[in-house]
Image: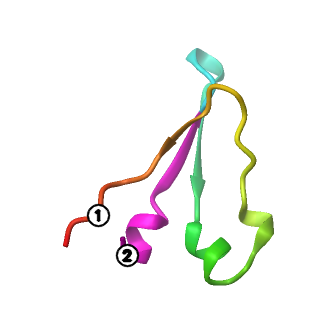
Amino acid sequence: MTGGEKDRTKILRGAGAGSQTIQVEISRITKQGDKSADIYLEPNDTVYVPQSFF
């Protein structure tokens, strides 16, 4: 997975009108060490990680 795919990782939180999509910049966490970009998962969160094509 390249940096571009990793940075398209999303967390889908909630359902209905109160739902939200949270973009996660994985490279900020893994390459830059920015722990403030790390997201705590909550019950019923769905993590979407895009497929990588070679």
Q: Can you identify the residue that label 2 sits on?
A: 2
Amino acid type, callout 1: Ser
Around disc 1, counting alpha carbons within 10 Å, would you say few (fewer than 14), some (14 to 19), or many (20 or more)?
few
Q: How far across and down, in percent of the image, does residue 40 sit?
A: 75, 47
Relative side of 33 to 5, left or right: right
Relative side of 50 to 30, left or right: left
Amino acid type, callout 2: Thr
Looking at this view, name the residue that lies furthest to the left: 54
The answer to whether the residue labelled 2 contacts the one labelled 1, judged by CB atoms less than 8 Å apart, is yes
Q: How far across and down, in percent of the image, does residue 26 sit?
A: 57, 67
The structure's colour scheme is: rainbow
User: Which residues make up the magenta segment?
Assistant: 1-12
Residue under the point 61% across and 26% down: 19
Relative side of 20 to 9, left or right: right
Q: Taking 38 as reference, is 46 above or below it?
A: above
Q: Taking 29 as reference, is 16 above or below it?
A: above
Q: Which mark is residue 4?
A: none
